[in-house]
Image (tube, rainbow, N blue to C red):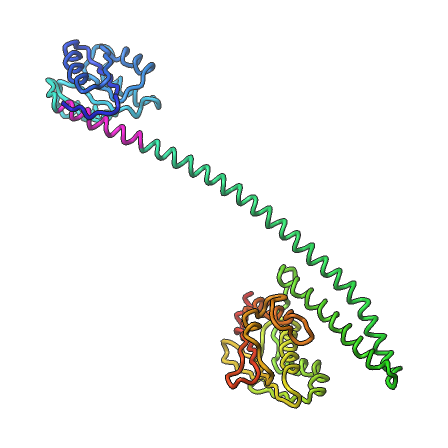
Amino acid sequence: MNTSIVKEYAILIVDDNPKNLQVLGKFLKEEKYQIEFAINGESALEWLKNKRFDLILLDINMPGMNGFEVCKIIRADSNLSKIPVIFLSADSERESILKGFEVGAQDYVTKPFDSRELLARVKTHLELKNAKDQLKLVNEGLEEKVQERTKELQEANSKLEAANRELETLDKAKSDFLRIIAHEINTPLNGIIGFIDILKDELKNSELYEMLHFLEVSAKRLEHFSSVSLRITELRTKNRMAIKEDSHLDLLIESVKENLAEQIHARKINLNVEGEANNTIIHGEPEMIKFCFESILKNAINYTKSEGTVTIKINSDGEQTICSFIDQGTGFSQKTLNNLYQLFAPGEKHIEGNKGLDLALVKIIMDSHKGKITINNNDDGIGATVTLSFPGHSLQNM
């Protein structure tokens, strides 16, 4: 006898022959199954309305409603359709068996019964049903978990979208605020610088002339800081749309040399341009690229000793254009090299005490142009090289 049954399965036996009910009931009760009996199709359906069964043993040939008709009704009912049905039949003809499967039976057993065969088939179908029930529960649990997770993700996404909207609002407010501040600073600064120029003409031979010079330097530093800060904010918050076009590299370099002519002359710097600048085109925003060149070249001039040499070296192979700015200064300390491009990073102050804002902006500009900036001390231990690498016309796809 099998005593390993853990779950107490309920089985409905439907047969109009009391002897069959008695024999089947005995077999199945010995296997610890719960048994209920019905002597016709109508009473079987009544049982199914009031109790949950795990298996139905259904006689085919019964008076009134036969087994085929009962099985059709069971399969049509969504609450009963998953209960396995095993037909009981004295008819072993092929057509009868096939019809049983057509109306929805899972199996059949022929009379007279072989107890071992009957119990084996019953056990098999009960185990199959139990496995399906367990799988259904697992799937329902998984579906519930998926729904819960989906809801959590939707809520998290909604919060993230709200946070992004808030950040965008804050970025715009910050950019707008800085633009207003820059305007409010630049407007009186322009007036101050203008009056300084007038006073310098009037007081050329006065002791106050040098004081005016320092005042002018301070005013221009403040003007430069305001301009750079605004550009950094606009680029970082993407509130500034770059207007890119083809620019001749030689014209950009000449414009930068003109802007820095006073510094070059004051320090007696020998400025060399090497390479094919005349035939090289850079695609980007001219004013932004010129700012990069001017910031790097100005730094190189200020760090190079008086009467020293600064070299701009141009290399272009069609896929990229490389502009290297080579000075003869003291080079960058390791501390500074470790914190390049970081706003207000710890380290030595750069020329004019700007804490590296210009380098940070150059890095942002190069990123916006899909370019690259690299900084290294020269191998001979004299000076440093700042290199800007511009890709080819892939920039037009930005």
The number of callouts visible is: 0
Residue at left offset 66%, top offset 76%: 351
Say whether residue 130 is magenta: yes
Vertical placement of residue 319 versus 278, above or below: above
The secondary structure that most of the magenta stretch takes on is: helix
Q: Quadrant of residue 226?
A: bottom right
Q: Is residue 27 left or right of residue 303?
A: left
Residue at left offset 46%, top offset 37%: 148
Vertical placement of residue 165 versus 253, above or below: above
Say whether residue 128 is magenta: yes
Residue at left offset 23%, top offset 12%: 37
Give the camera-side residue of 27 and 244: 27
Give the camera-side residue of 79 and 72: 79
Residue at left offset 61%, top offset 79%: 248
State the image coordinates of residue 218 (x, y, percent, origin top left): 76, 73
State the image coordinates of residue 106 (x, y, percent, origin top left): 22, 26
Vertical placement of residue 283 versus 277, above or below: above
Q: Is residue 383 left or right of residue 121?
A: right
Give the camera-side residue of 172 and 198: 198
Q: Quadrant of residue 297?
A: bottom right
State the image coordinates of residue 172 (x, y, percent, origin top left): 67, 55
Give the camera-side residue of 105 and 327: 327
Q: Is residue 164 left or right of residue 102?
A: right
Screen quadrant of the N terminus: top left
> Magenta stretch?
117-134
Screen quadrant of the C terminus: bottom right
Q: Is residue 174 left or right of residue 201?
A: left
State the image coordinates of residue 247 (x, y, percent, origin top left): 62, 76
